[in-house]
Image: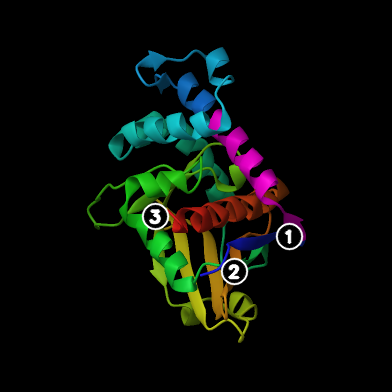
Amino acid sequence: MSEVKYKFTVDGEVWTKIQLERLEYERNLHTLHHLSRLGVEIKDGGRVLSDDEIDYLSMEKAWEVSIETRLQYKGEKIIELYKDGFKLSDAMWKRLGFSQDKPMKVSHCDMEVTGRSLQEFMGVMKAMQEDDRVGLAAHPEHFICHVSFDDGELLGIEPFGMYGTPTLVKVEVVDAADLGAQIQADKDPGFPMAMAGEAFLADGVTAVNCPYHQFKPTADGFEAKTAVYWPEHTPEEIVHGHSLHLAMEFFRGVELTGK
């Protein structure tokens, strides 16, 4: 296809490649500092970095160190590392009480891409779920959690909206037609493809959010309307922060499509 171009609109405001890359850089440094405080050795090759030395990593090197560090902490290891943080995030989501039948807040990010087909992009989305390195390269605050519990569910870990501590969630893929009426009202008939899910805490009972992403192919690329629905009283920092999280994740997905 032709030269790759894209436009990301976050809550109605356009974010550029330079802005998103800078935000990725800052979140990589944040994640490395956070892991360091939890006792993880942050290494550049064989050299252990101090907190001060982490701040001297270049943008490219910060990505490299971040991915390699997170690759070493997944599954039960990352669950144990963040067990105290999960107590805080679990308590918050239980207090907020999400339901698709109640009023909700929504994170929004729209994207327009030329030079990459929707099929190519979906291939990267699939790889994020199957290839640990790709999943970690999609966002600085993604953690891999391939752990099979008694029910055989797959769990995931991330701090929603770049806020607070990470949340341990179980995400169930659902048919968009089974979403609640309020979310269904946002369906755009011009976007024939959709991805939807329902996220719960590890207890499998406490609902956290509902992602609903709509896609349509175009003559030279594709467009997407991505959204995540939250409890009515979710802090605005999470709601807007996760709009940016979506932009960063899907921007990086486009970047990875060409590799």
Which range of residues does the magenta coloring cover?
Answer: 13-31
The crowding category of the residue bearing disc 1, from other C-alpha atoms within 10 Å (few below 14, some 14 to 19, many at least 20), is some
Which disc number belongs to residue 114? 2
Say whether residue 129 is visible: yes
* Magenta stretch: helix, strand or loop mostly: helix
Say whether residue 107 is visible: no
Amino acid tagged 2: Thr
Residue at far front of view = 2
Q: Position of residue 177 (x, y in %)?
A: 49, 82
Q: Position of residue 191 (x, y in %)?
A: 58, 81
Q: Residue at x 41, y 14 (%)?
A: 48
Viewer-side label of 3, 2: 2
For numbered disc 1, what is the local secondary structure?
loop
Amino acid tagged 1: Asp
For numbered disc 3, what is the local secondary structure?
helix
What residue does disc 1 label?
11
Q: Residue at x 67, y 59 (%)?
A: 232
What residue does disc 3 label?
128
Amino acid tagged 3: Met
